[in-house]
Amino acid sequence: MKYTLVVKQGQDGFLIGQLKELPAVFTQGLSISELKENIADALELHLEDMREIYQLSLVTQI
């Protein structure tokens, strides 16, 4: 799946990045390449959390 990375200028030279399709996934970096690495990490953590929440909800329904 492809995501749209929205980039804004932050303070002190930082770039702020947020995924348009998943606004809860955001991070910062000093360069575009660092921002892309960080957003990939943030996305991975977000998806892991969503899987855990989904699995817990299945367990509590049984």
Image (cartoon, rainbow, N blue to C red):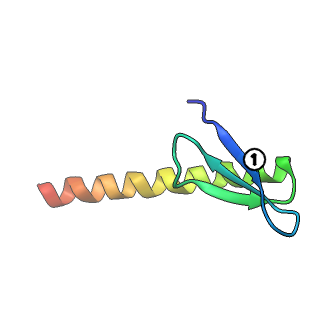
Compared across the picture, whether 30 is left or right of 60 comes to right
33 or 18, which is in the foreground? 18
45 or 32, which is in the foreground? 32
In this view, the residue farthest toward the left is 62
Going 57% across and 53% down the picture, which residue do you hit?
Answer: 25
Going 63% across and 50% down the picture, which residue do you hit?
Answer: 18
Per the image, the residue denoted by label 1 is: 36
Could you say where residue 10 lies in the image, as x and y percent from the top left? 78, 62
> Element under label 1?
helix
Could you say where residue 11 lies in the image, as x and y percent from the top left? 81, 67
Q: Which image quarter holds the N terminus? A: top right
Badge 1 amino acid:
Lys
Going 65% across and 54% down the picture, which residue do you hit?
Answer: 41
Going 62% across and 56% down the picture, which residue do you hit?
Answer: 26
Could you say where residue 54 lies in the image, as x and y percent from the top left? 31, 52
Compared across the picture, whether 19 is left or right of 30 comes to left
Is residue 61 placed above or below 1 in the rendered structure? Answer: below
Q: Which image quarter holds the C terminus? A: bottom left
